[in-house]
Amino acid sequence: MSIPDFQSVMRPVLEVVRDGAAIPLSALREAIADVFQLTEEERKEQLPSGHQTVINNRVGWSRTYLNKAGLLTIPSKGMVQITDRGRQALANGPARITVAWLKQFPEFADFHTSRPQVTEGQGVMGRAVIESTEATPDEQLADAHQALMQSLAEDLLAQVRAASPIFFEQLVVDLMLAMGYGGSRKEAGKATQATNDDGIDGIINEDKLGLDVIYLQAKRWSNTVHRPEIDKFIGALTRQRARKGVFITTSDFSVGAREAALGLDIKVVLIDGVELARLMVEHNLGVSVKQVYEVKQVDSDYFAGEGRGNLKRIPILLKIKDKLRFYFSMEYLLEYRFAKSEIRTMKSNGRGS
């Protein structure tokens, strides 16, 4: 069974807590995973952000939506409990509770409609993401980010393909530097000069110490790279007794070309146009930050003990601070008096001689 969307989780959440006892959110998550008979892999599947599992995120948002609609209450941190309205929903509600059904409750309607509305400039893509109710807000944000990244990569690749061959060669150097290869820009520029081997465009240090080198081939092509080009590159690497090579193109590699790079004693990495654009974005090459959105969460440590625990410790810390100040001031005073006494003794001895 696949991982359910967060709306499909809502009624099962109510059923798990229907007896009225408050249970931990962690127990609720585990129970929902059992209800849907999720495999170990499905339970561990992460959101694109890598910060949370998909099922935990969907159970969490189901709890939030049910709480905003008054069907669940959160009696204390990390706990979940059903309300009378929640019991009525189990008795009289639909087999599948949805966002649309929850909108009948004024509290939830106010919560749901308070979100930013789609503007004219956001277009169809933005409207589809925001109005999607199958995905949680976290997933909607991830989907929107992925769509923006894909559009950016396509625009970036178009710019690279339109650039001159000389610019493309410099781009390859800049990318290798951004990924940590080649040492300094000056050294990298020298290292990528032609090698007089028609199968190799340049050589660059693998590390700043130059303990190993990587041989490069860069093709600013629009046509697919086929096996003969890869075979020629491998042959050139063999003649140089090289162990590592990178073949970069703005187009794509045929199946035969990719197969040619496998199962060799030489390590050959193929970077096509899509991967090239991805690496440029990842290493901030040829791109700049347009906007930054911060996603924040409640700092539970701040509210530990309703904040009083930290306040209670303040007088104690002040007392310790005062004692330390007194100790060091007394020590300083004793040292000062001792030094003054020594000076007097020395002066006295000096007068007596």
Image (tube, rainbow, N blue to C red):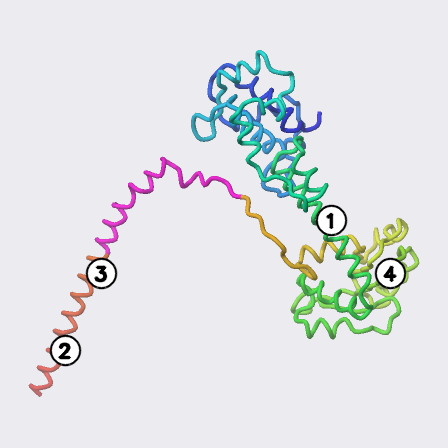
Q: Residue furthest front?
A: 120
According to the image, label 1 marks what residue? 150
Residue 198, numbered label: none
Where is residue 62 shown, x and y percent of the image? Answer: 58, 28
**In terms of secondary structure, where does tag 2 sit?**
helix
Q: Residue furthest right?
A: 228
The amino acid type found where label 2 is placed reads Ile
Q: Is residue 298 left or right of residue 307?
A: right
Say whether disc 4 or disc 2 marks the residue closer to the N-terminus. Answer: 4
Q: CA distance from mark 1 to mark 2?
A: 79 Å
According to the image, label 4 marks what residue? 221
The amino acid type found where label 1 is placed reads Gln
Q: Is residue 156 left or right of residue 240?
A: left
Q: Main secondary structure of the magenta part?
A: helix
Dot 1 and dot 2 residues touching (CB under 8 Å):
no
- Residue 310 in magenta stretch: yes
Name the foreground residue: 237 vs 316: 316
Q: Which residues are magenta?
A: 296-324
Say whether disc 1 or disc 3 marks the residue closer to the N-terminus. Answer: 1
**In terms of secondary structure, where does tag 1 sit?**
helix
Where is residue 305 shown, x and y percent of the image? Answer: 36, 35
Residue shown at the point (68%, 46%) measured from the top left: 121
**In terms of secondary structure, where does tag 3 sit?**
helix
Say whether disc 3 or disc 2 marks the residue closer to the N-terminus. Answer: 3
Residue 343, numbered label: 2
Residue 328, numbered label: 3
